[in-house]
Image (tube, rainbow, N blue to C red):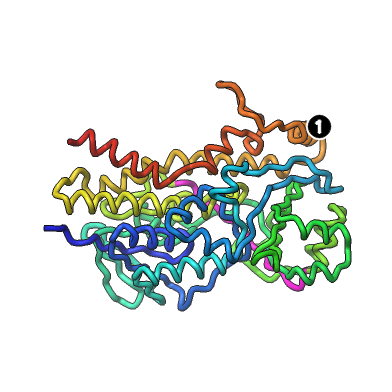
Amino acid sequence: MMAPSINAIIVGAGIGGLACAIAARRQGLNVTVLERAEKLTPVGAGIQIPPNAARIWAQYGLLDQLKEYSVVSKATVLRAWKDGELLCSRSVGEALNSDWPWLVIHRADYQRILAAEASRLGVDIKLRAEVQDIDFETTTVTLRNGEFISGDVIIGADGLWSTLRSRILGHDSPPRETGDLAYRGTFSLSALQALKDPAVDELCKQNIVTMWIGPESHAVLYPVRCGNEFNLVMTRPDDLPSDVKTEVGNLEQMKALFEGWDPVLTKVLTAFSSVLKWKMLHHDELSSWTRNNVALLGDACHPSLPYQAQGAAMAVEDGAIVATLLGLYQQSHSESLPTLTLPETLKLYESVQKARTTTLHLGSISNQHLYHLDDGPEQEERDRILKAADWKDKPDGESEPFIWIDVGYQKAVVGRDAIGDAKKKWYEVAKQRT
C-alpha cells in the first residue's frame, strides 16, 4: 500500500516559496502556499536569473517560458565610475550560455510565470493568509484571522521579515541596516532612444549587465522584457531615517549624487520619470534552519547583500533541494523503505546547502568592497588586476585576489546542479542506513 502524500505548507509566495511549491508538486507532494498579501504584487523591478537557477528551471520545464519575457545576458561588465573605462568583462562561458543561460527579467514577469505554473500543477495558493504563530509539536500554523492550518511539514519562505524565523529563534529577529540604500527604477527603451545620444543607443544594443563602480557607490543597468525596458539600480550610503524602509526618491537629488560620473550614465538618468529610494537591510545567517518538521529557506534564514546576483537564485536552489529531498522521503515510505525521519530530511537539506550559502554570503561582502573602493592606490591596483584578468583556472592552492575574476569560484557558483546534489546526498545517507 502506498503511503499518503506529504502535506506541505509553504509560508510566502515570493520567488523562493513558489520555486519550492513547483518543485514539491512535481515530487507528488500536496502543497498549500500561505501568502499574507491580498494579491501577488511583486516588489522591485529587474532581477537576474544566473545559470545555477536557470538549470533548475530547465529541469522543471520552465526555462523556455522565462526566456520569452527576458533577455539572455552575454556578459557582465565593470566600468570606472568617472569616465566609463572598461575594467573587466565576464561571461559565463559558451557551454553554460547554451544550456543554462544568464537571464535578466522583470520581477513581475518572473513571479507571474511561477505563480501560474504553481497553480497549473495544483498548488493551493491562499491569499490574505498571514501567519501569526506556529506550533512546532503539531506542525500547525495560526493565521491572523484565527484559522489553524496543519500539515506534515512547514517551509518558511517569508523573507527578510520572517515570522517563522522569529518563532524558531524564540524572540523577535528584525533585520538590520547595512549602511547602503538603492535608487531603483525602470524606463522604456523608447525613453532612452529619445535622448538621441549615440553612446546610449550603443549601450541599448548590447544585451549585457553594465556596472559602474565608484567610491561608496555603484550603478547597475540591464535590459528586461525582451529589451523593451531597462532596469537601473544605483547604490549609495544610506541616508533614510531608521524607521523608513522605502520612499519615493527625489530625482534632482539623485542626479546630484551621481554628478561627475560617466556621461553615459548621467545621460541615462535623465530618462527617469520616477524612482524609489530603498533601504538595504540585512540579517545574520542562522546557525540552524530547521526545528522539528519546520524549515526555512531564502532570506528567512540566509539573507545576503545584493552584490552577487545570487539572492533569489539561492532561494530557488533551497526550494528545489528541500522539495527533492521531501519527494525522496515520500518515495522511500511508499516503498516501505524508510531511511530518514522528516526532521532528519530537513536537516539533510540544511547540510546540502548551508556551506554554499555561507560562501556566497561572504562573496557578496567581498564584492561590496570591490565595487566601493575610494579613489587611490588600492583602487588603482584593483583596476590593474581587473584589466589583466586572463580567465584561466589557477593551479591548486592559488586564487585570484578578487572572487569576481576567480574562474574556479565562478564555476562553482553558476555551474552548480542543486537537484543533482540533493539526490546524491540522499542516496549517500540512505546507503549508510541500510
Q: Residue 325: x and y, percent?
A: 31, 49
**Which residues are drawn in magenta?**
272-285
- Which amino acid, by three-letter code, is at mark 1? Pro
State the residue in front, 100 or 291: 100
State the residue in front, 324 or 71: 71
State the residue in front, 78 or 206: 206
Compared with 29, 274 (above or below) is: below
Helix, strand or loop under label 1: helix
Location of the N terminus (image quadrant): bottom left
- Residue at (48, 61) in percent of width and height: 62
Compared with 395, 263 (above or below) is: below
- Residue at (34, 54) in percent of width and height: 323
Compared with 202, 382 (above or below) is: above
Mark 1: give few (<14), some (14-19) or many (20+) Cα within 10 Å: few
Image-based side of 390 in relation to 50, left or right = right
Number of marks drawn: 1
Mark yes or no: residue 323 visible: yes
Residue at the limit of the structure toward the left, as seen here: 1
Image-based side of 304 in relation to 379, left or right = left
Q: Residue 144: x and y, percent?
A: 36, 74
State the residue in front, 399 or 347: 399
Mark yes or no: residue 245 visible: no
Query: Residue 275 lies in magenta, yes or no?
Result: yes
- Residue at (62, 39) in percent of width and height: 366
- Residue at (60, 47) in percent of width and height: 97
Q: Residue 221: x and y, percent?
A: 72, 57
According to the picture, the residue beneath numbered tag 1 turns out to be: 377
| Res 131 → quadrant | bottom left
Query: Residue 243 lies in magenta, yes or no?
Result: no
Image-based side of 150 in relation to 235, left or right = left
Location of the C terminus (image quadrant): top left
